[in-house]
Image (cartoon, rainbow, N blue to C red):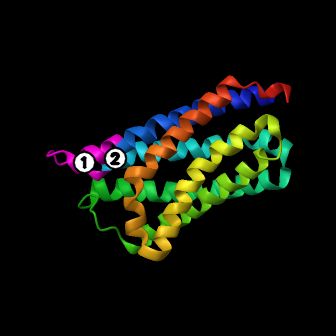
């Protein structure tokens, strides 16, 4: 019964993550095509909320993932915690620069790009570990497949970062965040519909 309660929390967390990631995508496009000077902070806030909810959702998936593959589930938790720490530091930096500095600029500092790279690598490994855990059993395989969607988007960004640089990779969020948001929503709806307590 406890697993059912946890999956209920997961559904909410991933639905929140999907909603805010899609909101982030809309704000990025509005900023690009609107004549109004919209600060990057307004696009960053929903992205931070979405990614935080997604990572916490992964942490709440641990009891269910550990039934499928305990080793991968533990790895997923470790990488998710690392992603949380990197995202937390990045969020503090964004707010500090916006409130006390000159605001967010298009040119980001080198250490901030490294921090984002660490976050992305940790997120990729966290989602990969959980996806592999859920792909072990047919009853929950759909969860594994849905976890692979954000994973593929972040993987694409990391590959672009290696060959073209982190700035170019981050600019892909105009497209990748829409896919990630859709995957988060689908994951939340799937967790809400399925009763994992009986597994």
Report whether residue 119 is seen.
no
Q: Which residue is mark 1?
A: 31
How many numbered discs, if any? 2
Q: Indicate whether 22 appears above or below 191.
A: below
Name the residue: 82% across, 45% down. 66
Assess whether residue 114 is covered by the magenta stretch: no
Q: Position of residue 60 (x, y in %)?
A: 69, 39
Question: Would residue 151 be found to the left or right of residue 136 on screen?
Answer: left
Determine whether the residue tagged by mark 2 lies in a helix, strand or loop.
helix
Per the model, the C-alpha gap separating discs 1 and 2 is 8 Å
Report whether residue 167 is seen.
yes
Which numbered disc covers residue 43?
2
Assess whether residue 29 is covered by the magenta stretch: yes
Decide: few, some or many residues near mark 2? Use Cα within 10 Å; few <14, some 14-19, many ≥20: many
Name the residue: 18% across, 45% down. 34
Question: Would residue 150 be found to the left or right of residue 178 on screen?
Answer: right
Q: For the magenta stretch, what is the residue range?
A: 26-40
Quarter of the rendering occupied by the C terminus: top right
State the image quarter where residue 125 is shown. Answer: bottom right
Q: Are marks 1 and 2 in contact (CB under 8 Å)?
A: yes
Name the residue: 43% across, 72% down. 111
Q: Indicate whether 156 appears above or below 15.
A: below
Q: Between residue 168 and residue 48, name the one nearer to us.
A: 168
Which numbered disc covers residue 120?
none
Q: Between residue 57 and residue 157, name the one nearer to us.
A: 157
The majority secondary structure of the magenta stretch comes to helix
């Amino acid at each position: 019964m406890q697993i059912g309660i946890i999956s209920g929390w997961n559904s909410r967390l991933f639905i929140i993550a999907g909603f805010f990631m899609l909101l982030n995508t809309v704000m990025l496009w509005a900023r690009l095509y609107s004549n109004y000077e919209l600060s990057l902070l307004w696009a960053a806030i929903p992205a931070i909320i979405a990614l935080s909810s997604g990572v916490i959702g992964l942490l709440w998936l641990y009891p269910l993932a550990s039934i499928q593959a305990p080793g991968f589930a533990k790895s997923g938790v470790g990488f998710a915690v690392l992603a949380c720490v990197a995202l937390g530091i990045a969020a503090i930096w964004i707010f500090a620069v916006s409130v006390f500095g000159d605001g967010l600029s298009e040119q980001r500092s080198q250490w901030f790009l490294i921090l984002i790279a660490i976050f992305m690598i940790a997120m990729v490994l966290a989602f990969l570990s959980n996806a592999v855990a859920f792909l072990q059993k047919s009853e929950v395989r759909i969860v594994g497949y849905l976890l692979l969607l954000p994973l593929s988007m972040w993987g694409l960004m990391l590959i672009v970062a290696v060959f073209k640089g982190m700035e170019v990779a981050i600019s892909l969020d105009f497209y990748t965040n829409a896919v990630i948001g859709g995957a988060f929503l689908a994951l939340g709806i799937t967790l809400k519909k399925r009763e994992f307590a009986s597994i």
